[in-house]
Amino acid sequence: MKIYLVSSTDSPEFTRLKCSFARSTVIALDAEWKPQRSSTSSFPIVTLLQVACRLGHDSDDVFLIDLTSIHLPSVWELLNDMFVSPDVLKLGFRFKQDLVYLSSTFTQGGCDGRFHEVKHYMDITGIYNHLQHKRFGRKAPKDIKSLAAICKELLDISLSKELQCSDWSHRPLTEEQKLYAATDAHCLLQIFDVFKSNLVEEITSQDPKHINVGLKDILNGSDFTSKIVTAKLCKAADVIRAMTQNGQNIANGMVSRKTTLNTMPMDENLLKIVRKYGERILLKESDLLPRISKKKTRRRTSLKNEKTDKHLVCSMDWQGPPPWDSSLGGDGCPKFLLDVMVEGLAKHLRCVGIDAAVPPSKKPDSRKLLDQALKEKRVLLTRDTKLLRHQDLAKHQIYRVKSLLKNEQLLEVIETFQLKISENQLMSRCTKCNGKFVQKPLTIEEAIEAAKGFQRIPNCLFNKNLEFWQCMNCHQLYWESFRLLFVDLGSLKCVVMSEQTRC
Ligand SMILES: [Zn+2]
């Protein structure tokens, strides 16, 4: 992989970028942005766009387009053409969000156009889940796997996440940042390689009539022949393009595509993949409206809600102190209440010893939820923006969790509330009910006694000299050799236990 930093449109790197766009039929995309929100928009500003172009085996170009220095209106068309080109498969990892931010960044940078669409897009998560299902019959997991986890599993590459939160608006970028940014996009190409053979095999076996028709027979021949056909098709496309450029009207606008890209068509295998799995990212106008301006519009139309909406704006970011703070008469022990939308996070918090309660009933009304938070001096964690509009909770008693993945949510909460996690806290709380463990570990005899008529201890544990803990609240027994799940949270590493132990 060769890395090029593209900082202006009159640089050799930019020429190389245009050339690579034209020669690639698979391009992987990623973006880095400054998380801090500027005052004019609630969307982060994208400072770097990474584009990895597949040029052939072992020769990939990765371009780091520096959006802080390049003239945005001059690159908009080139990028947009690539996004909508039917000749390029675009790979991404949850790229829709990047596209929203990118669009907002370009509009703010003086561009008239926005990015509305990505054609022939494939999300790595989607393909990963699909193949897991094929291979193991597993259903798509509820958690979305992180890119790092997918990379580790399929490529055995560890993506360092240390730089993810580094300042991406600072210039010059460090060498480490460049490599990190390039790898994040490039690994998508590598993951796709792993998938590609699988996918082609699958499509061919599923759909035999797809193959044995006329010209497609030839296309399915050796690589050599398909290359020839590709080359010929490319020539024909050039001719057509040349004609349109000369102002000739091709019948019924069939080839009305005007593009800055002089692309090559995909080979047949790739076309098959795209036909079956390609998606389209379409941004609606509402996607492109920053959240704050949406609120402003609402505020204008309905004066009645003015107060509540102001409250909502305030609540987007955490403003302390938390109710357990000693300045508010608290005991200093962090306590949370998790609504149903972040319920899974409760277990993660308990694993690191944090008091994380959930409401007693499955579907509590928001009134009850707020009451409980107030009464027990907890911070209510939610993803429900409607809850933030309630007047009853002071803004320091409710927090909207922004991350989607549980591990990231855990990290977000730990960082936001500056929770201190110590090693002896790790196995101190029942993941089932949030109760505390009895102080002293139980011996096997005590454990058997405690488990009578309640919980079965697998025989295989008896001669292993293990320590047992019991939850003081629900009496669930835990033992030392619990399947340990290692949760890597970047700077914080912690061990999470699971009740589902098998021998
Ligand atoms: Zn318990």
Image: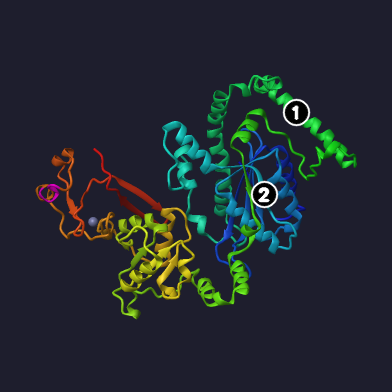
Residue 148 sits above or below residue 228 on the image: below
Mark 1 crowd level (few <14, some 14–19, many ≥20, 10 Å Cα):
some
Instruction: Indicate the quadrant where residue 255 lies.
Output: top right
Residue 440 sits above or below residue 154 on the image: below
Q: Which residue is identified by label 2?
A: 117
| Residue at 16% from the left image edge and 55% from the top image edge | 441
Mark 2: amino acid: Glu
Residue 77 or residue 361, whichever sits in front: 361
Residue 177 or residue 87, whichever sits in front: 87
Mark 1: amino acid: Ala
Select label 1 or label 2 by which is in front: 2
Q: Which residue is identified by label 1?
A: 231
| Residue at 45% from the left image edge and 67% from the top image edge | 387
Instruction: Indicate the quadrant where residue 59 lies.
Output: top right
Please provide percent x and percent y for residue 363: 37, 59
Please provide percent x and percent y for residue 1: 60, 41
Residue 166 sits above or below residue 480 on the image: below
Q: Residue furthest right?
A: 247
| Residue at 58% from the left image edge and 39% from the top image edge | 189
Quadrant assignment for the C terminus = top left
Please provide percent x and percent y for residue 430: 25, 56
Separation (CA) of disc 1 from disc 2: 28 Å
Earlier sequence position, callout 1 versus callout 2: 2
Coloration mode: rainbow
